[in-house]
Image (spheres, helix red, strand yellow):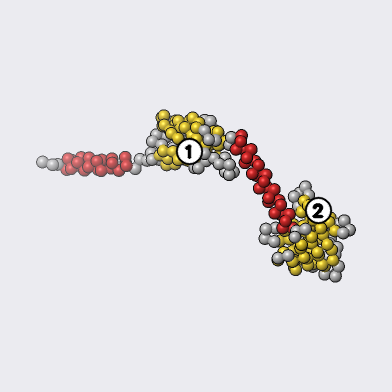
Amino acid sequence: MITPATMVILTLLNLCLISTPAMSSSAKAPKPDLHAGGLQPSSIPNDAITDVVLPGFHLTGAHIETDHLCTVVSYRVVSDNEIKMKIKGTRTIDDTEDQCSIHIRTAGGIASTWIVVELTDTQQQEQTARQKKAAKAKADAFISRSGKTWHLKFADGSSETYTSTGMNQDSMPTFTSGTSKAVKIAVANDNSVIIIEPNCIRSGKLVGSIVKDGQSQGDCSPSGSWEATIVR
């Protein structure tokens, strides 16, 4: 015969059986933590395979992914606190970034770090040469946009002609007038024009080879509006 007391005990046991699986299923694996000193070494040579140790916490069951700057050839999860890897640098000369991202993925989540990929001496020399060439091409394009000769006509009827003398130490195209008056004239990518004279700045918009809306600011002589024609 089941007494009221027995019913209470059976009810409590049943509640325990129901609640126990729910509690265990809600437990989550801890997220990997890489705050344990960082990769050793922190940089690797390009085009070579290097042994790398990654210390951390909660690394059991880790899977590793990288970006295109390096490749994990192989890896082994030594313990919950350490992963040993063989990483190859696969950086190209055109890659301006030198940090390869490494992502550690476990059931608990994702943690990321990075390792520097050093170009070889030959690759570094070639990259430097390319960068210098690109910088020169950019400077030459800047000079070319500014033209060789500017014919300015001012609101008071006077005019001035400026002839290119090259580029100064500030990388600004320089010009001089027939009276040896020196100015800087630059044309931006959007064809905005700026003419810099002592205590004077003139600005406008180049359309084709003509400026029609020139304005003057500062102690300009002549002052006021101006127009210009550029000869390239």
Asked which secondary structure carries label 2, the reply is strand
- Is residue 45 visible to the viewer in this orientation of the structure? yes
- Which is nearer the eye, 12 or 226? 226
Image-quadrant location for residue 157 = bottom right
For this orientation, the residue located farthest to the left is 1
Q: Where is residue 227 in the image (x, y as percent from the top left)?
A: 78, 67
Image-quadrant location for residue 161 = bottom right
- Which is nearer the eye, 32 or 131? 131
**What amino acid does circle 2 point to?**
Thr
Q: Identify which residue is drawn at 45% across, 35% down.
A: 73
Asked which secondary structure carries label 1, the reply is strand
Q: Identify which residue is drawn at 70% across, 58% down.
A: 188
Q: Identify which residue is drawn at 79% across, 60% down.
A: 149
**What amino acid does circle 1 point to?**
Thr
Image position of 133 (left or right of 1): right
Q: Mark 1 points at which residue?
A: 71
**The N terminus, quarter of image:** top left
Q: Position of residue 174 (x, y in %)?
A: 79, 54
Q: Are marks 1 and 2 in contact (CB under 8 Å)?
A: no
Label annotation for residue 205? none
Callout 1 environment at 10 Å: few (<14), some (14 to 19), or many (20+)?
Answer: some
- Is residue 31 visible to the viewer in this orientation of the structure? no
Query: How many numbered badges does the structure rendering display?
Result: 2
Above or below for 171 versus 113: below
Above or below for 159 versus 103: below
Q: Where is residue 120 in the image (x, y as percent from the top left)?
A: 59, 35
Q: Mark 2 points at which residue?
A: 165
Q: Identify which residue is drawn at 28% across, 40% down.
A: 20
- Which is nearer the eye, 40 or 165? 165
For this orientation, the residue located farthest to the right is 179
**The C terminus, quarter of image:** bottom right
